[in-house]
Image (spheres, helix red, strand yellow):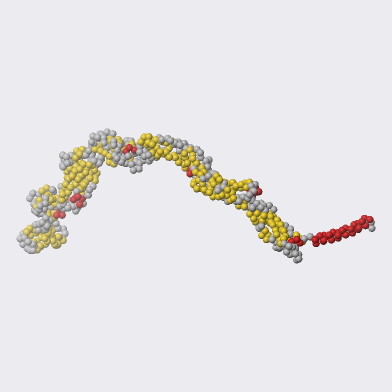
Amino acid sequence: MTKYHQFSASTAKKQALAFMCLMCLVATSLWAQPAQLTISKIDRTQVTPTKMYDGTTNTIITHLGALEGLDSAHTQVALYGTAHYITPNVGGIKSVVVTYTLGDIDSAYYLAPQNDTLLAAITPKPLTVTGTTVDSNKVYNGGTVATITNVGTPNGIIAGDTVYISALGRFDDPNVGNNKNVTVTYMLSGVPAHCANYIVPAPASLTANITPLQLYAPLPILQANKVYDGTITCNVVLTGELTGMIAGDEVYYRATASFSDPNVGQNKPVSVYSYLYGPKSGNYTVVDTSTRQYTANILPLKLTVDGAVVNLIKDYDGTDTAIILAYPQPTNLIGNDAVTLITTARYDNPNPGSNKTITLSFRFPAVSPAGYSNANYTAPDDIIYSTLGKIILPTILDTTVGTNGFIATNTHNCPGSQFNGTFTLAQGSPTYYTLEFDDNALAQGFINTTNDIVLAEGSNTFNIAFDIPANCAPGTYSVTFRIGNESMREIRHTTTFNVNLSNTYLVRVFNDVVSVDNRNNTFNTYQWYLNDNPIEGATKAYYQDPRGYLNGNYSLLVNRGTESEQFICPITFDDQPEQAKTLTAYPNPVVNNATLKLTGFESEQHLLTIYNSYGTAVLRTTFSGQEYTIDMTTLPQGTYMINVDGLTAKTVKL
C-alpha cells in the first residue's frame, strides 16, 4: 500500500471516529434541550378572515390549533398565540403571522411551535361627512356644478393618517328652478397609501335653487302709426339683440306693446312689455333699464261697403237723385262696432236720357249717436255704381178718356168669360200692370197677377184682361190696376165691375120663344135685350121673336125685389128662316086633348116638354112619329108653351 493510500485509510478511520464522537455529542445535546412542539395539520389555527382597516396590524385569532409532540409525562402545557398582519394597510389577500407561546408547569420541557403564516384581508374603512352645505342660490350659467360652501366634517379617519376630503356638487340639470336636487360627491386626497385604506363617503343629496341669469336687451322701437283694428296692440318694429346669454342657448327676445284703449287718437300712451322665448328662455330674465315714456297714434280705418242696390231707372223729377233700393253695408267693421253712414246716389245730370253715370257718396252725420263708433272710421270713397243709369218720363193717364183714362170694353161680365178694358196714356211708356182684387173677389176665385205691357209703336193705349171664374157668384167686385214702368214707379187705378147672372137661367121654350127660369119666383121685373139693345115692350118672363125664329144674343135685365137690377148673361141662337121646322098644335084653345103635327123633323123619336107661362116645365115625355095627341085634361087653364126637340108652339087651355 502506498503512503497515499495509507494516509487515506488512516484518515478515514480518523474521520469515522470523529463522526461517531459527534453523533454522541448530538444525542447528548438533544436529550438535554426542550422538545419542539408543532400545530396539528388537522386542527389548525384560524384567524378572522377580514377586518376593517384600523391603522394597526393586529387581528383576532378565532381558533388555536391543537398541539402535537407532547410527552405523555409532561402534558400540562398551555398554548398562546398572537396574530399580526405584516402591514396595516388594506389588502385583499394578506399574510397574517401567528406567533405561539407556551405556558403552564410543563412548558419548560418544550419549545413553542414555529410561527404560522395565514391569509386574511383588510377592508377599507367607510368614512362619513356631516355638515356639508352648498350655495342655496346659484345664478344660471349653463352648467350643473353647485358651489360647495362647506365640505363638512369627515368622520372615521385614523389618527396619524394624512387623508383629506373634498366635495363636488352637481344639480340634476342646469335649468332654473327652486329646491332642485344637488348630488354632492366626495373625494379623498393626501398620502395615497393612506387614502387607499378608506371608502369615500357616500354622495349626499341636498337642495338648492338655480336663479335666472339677467340679460340686457336694447330699447324697443314702436310703429308710430297704426290703423284702428279694435285692439290695443301696438306693433313693435325692432327689439334688437340680447347680451349676456350663455353660448349655445336658444333664447330669443320679443317685446309687445299696448295702448290703454283701442280707439283712434294722437300721441296715445303705450305700455311696453318684453319677454323671452325659446328652449332655454326659462333660465333667463330681461333687465329693463328703460325709463322712456312711449306714445303712438291710432289712425281711423277707412270703411269699405258692399250690397248697395240702386234703381238704375227713375221717373224724371228735375233732380239728379237716384233711388236707393237697398243701402250698402260696411264690410270691414271691427267686432261689434256699429256706425251711422249716410249714403246718397246721384246721376251725372237730372235730364231724361240713357247711359247715365250713377255715383254713390258716403258721409257720417255731424254728430255721432251714443254707442256708435264713427270716430274710429272714415267714410268710404265715392263709388261709381253704374254707367247704365236712365231717367224716363213718368207715366200719366189721359183723364179725358173714360174714367181716369180707363174704359171697360165688356158689355156683360159673365162667369167663365173674360173682363177686358183699355187704358189711354197722356205720357210715358209703362211696362207692366198688376191686378189686385178685393177680398170678396179673391174669395170667388179671382187671382192677383202681374202682366207685361207691350205698347205698339206710336200707340198710347194698352189693353188689360182677366178671367172671371166659371163659378163666380153674381155681384159687384173691385180691382186695382197698379201700372208700373222701368223705374218700378207705379200709378193706381181702382174700378168696380159687375158679374152678371149665368145664362143658365134662360131657356128656349119654342122655336121663336126664349124664357127665364123663374120657378122660385126670384125675379119680379123684366126687360129683354137683343144684341145688347133693349127690346121695346119685351117686359114679360118670356120673349117671342116676331121673326118666327131665334137668332142673336138674348139677355135679360131683371130685378130681385129690393135689390138693384141685374143682367142675366146672353144666350145665343143662330136659327135661320130657311132652316126652321114647323110644329102645329090644334085645336087652339084646347079643352082636353091637343094634337101635335110635325114637319121638317128628321129624327123619328122626339122629346116633348110643356112649360107654363112662368117658364116652368109641367110635363115631359117622349113620342115617335110626326103626330102625337096630348092629354091636357089635368092641366089648369092658362097659356102653355109646347116644345118638341127645341121647337115651340103656343096654345091656350080653356
Residue farthest along the bottom direction in this orientation? 72
> In the picture provided, is 98 more to the left or to the right than 261?
right
Q: Is residue 200 left or right of residue 654?
A: right
Q: Residue at x 40, y 37 (%)?
A: 270
Residue visible at 65% across and 56% down in the picture? 50
* Of the pair 183 and 216, the residue shown nearer to us: 183
Which corner quadrant holds the N terminus? bottom right
Query: In the orientation shown, which residue stands out farthest toward the front?
Result: 105
- Image label count: 0
Residue 105: x %, y % from top left: 73, 62
Q: Work out which residue is located at the far left of the displayed protein and give it.
A: 654
Residue 440 spot, x, y in % from top left: 18, 50
Name the foreground residue: 255 vs 343. 255
User: Quadrant location of the C terminus?
Assistant: bottom left
Residue 544 image point, x, y percent? 10, 53
Q: Can residue 41 be seen by looking at this rendering?
A: no
* Front residue (pair 2, 119): 119
x and y percentages locating residue 579 in the rendered image: 14, 53
Report whether 623 appears left or right of 96.
Answer: left
Question: Which residue is at a point 67% across and 53% down the rendered structure image?
Answer: 57
Q: Which one is in front, 282 or 7?
A: 7
Can residue 190 be seen in the rendering of this structure?
yes
